[in-house]
Image (cartoon, grey):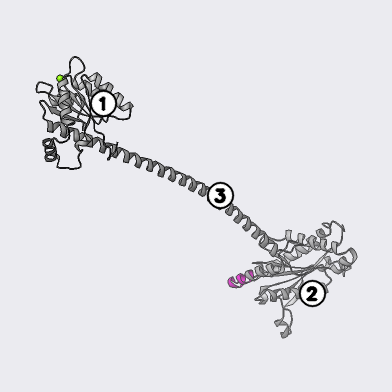
Amino acid sequence: MDANNPNLRVLVIDDNLSIHEDFRKILQAKAGEESFDEARTALFGDPSLPKESEQFELDCADQGQAGLTMVQLARSEGRPYAMAFVDMRMPPGWDGLETIERLWEEDAELQVVICTAYSDQPWDEVTKRIGRNDKLLILQKPFNSIEVSQLATAFCRKWGLAREVAGQLDKLNRKVDERTAELRGANEQLTQSNAVLVQTVADLEIAQSEILLKNDELERLASRDPLTGCLNRRAFFSQFETALNESREHGIELSCLMVDIDNFKRINDQFGHAVGDQAIQAIANCLSTGLRLMDIIGRYGGEEFCVMFPRTKLAEAAVLAERLRIRVATEAGVRMRMASRLAITVSCGISSTMHGARVPLALIDQADKALYAAKEGGRNCVMALDPIIDGANASDQAKPQVRRITPQVLSPQASR
Ligand SMILES: [Mg+2]
């Protein structure tokens, strides 16, 4: 049943069999009854209305019960009625209203014209009982043929349109369902992709922090002497330069200590390079653990170390240096694994910024001079570039003098 094949099935339920005949005459008029055609055109003015050749398909029942059976049968056969004309009074069976209620229980789409006489129930009582409804119209008896034809035509068209709309709605709903399913699928894929992305970002963050750790480790390795763990020469100079600049800016004295292992060549020749390395490690350990937190030590050369004492006057540095010298002399030999109790000593030279050094090398050079004097002075001692000038000689005033810090009595003469 569609636009080309409209549902023109009409059911008449009336206890008066002669009324059945009246409906047949109106709704199944033979071709050539021109007066009827004219009346139709005058009423509807629409040439697309069902032609007489498409006559209504009419069935009749004389009781509500029988009508219901026919509606049930029609639906089960898949060819439902588009509409029914139902009489109001049909003794001895159901009246029109009860019949309509039962018909709608069976087929909610069925449209009904209720046929009443003046003596029947008024319209407002009818609607009170079965509700106001666009599938129900009232037709007053005695009815005329044009009215009947008009109602049948209008309801059959309305039935077809309603079916069409329902079909379109159904199609739309299916499309909405399909699209919803597609969107849901796309959403699931997005959620999965997002989870993968989140995981990737987390992996990258872990990798990045590992790289940072490795970089730190590399930086540490690049700045350290592998044998002793002290700063290497490059890293030491870098920190020395910074500290020296700060000391100059704030006018605070900074001291520098050069340390050289005594008779290192003899240790190497006598015990081999492995023991020589151990001696260097033992001394580095003694020096490092004997420093204050702010002091910085670097391995300057083969058996040479350089220590920087920030914010430290020369006299204070001399005390620190002497303490370090004693620490090495008493502990370094004990810390040797391969040549226990080896006598290891160091010579130390100190200077400070009070002598006007503006760059690390100048200060180191001054400390080196003091160190040379310590070597000359019998080793295992500390010498400082002293500001105290003794001398009536005016030319002496320009040059600082080297002064022995280590008491002469403690100097081990045997090591010379
Ligand atoms: Mg009747």
* Mark 3 vs ligand 1: CB below 8 Å: no
Viewer-nearest residue: 237 or 248: 237
Say whether residue 215 is magenta: no
Q: Would you name the residue on which mark 3 appears?
A: 199
Q: Residue at x 55, y 53 (%)?
A: 201
Q: Callout 2, which amino acid?
A: Tyr
Q: Position of residue 171 (x, y in %)?
A: 35, 41
- Magenta-drawn segment: 243-251
Residue 345, visible in the rendered structure? yes
Q: Would you name the residue on which mark 2 appears?
A: 372
Q: Residue at x 53, y 51 (%)?
A: 197
User: Are there few (<14), some (14-19), or many (20+) residues within 10 Å of tag 2?
Assistant: some
Ligand 1 located in image quadrant: top left
Q: Callout 1, which amino acid?
A: Trp
Residue 263, visible in the rendered structure? no
Whether residues under marks 2 and 3 lie with C-beta atoms below 8 angstroms apart, the answer is no
- Of circles 1 and 3, the one toward us is 1
Could you tell me how far apart the alpha carbons at marks 2 and 3 are, in whole angstroms? 64 Å
Assign the C terminus to one quadrant of the image.
Answer: bottom right
Is 326 above or below relative to 69? below
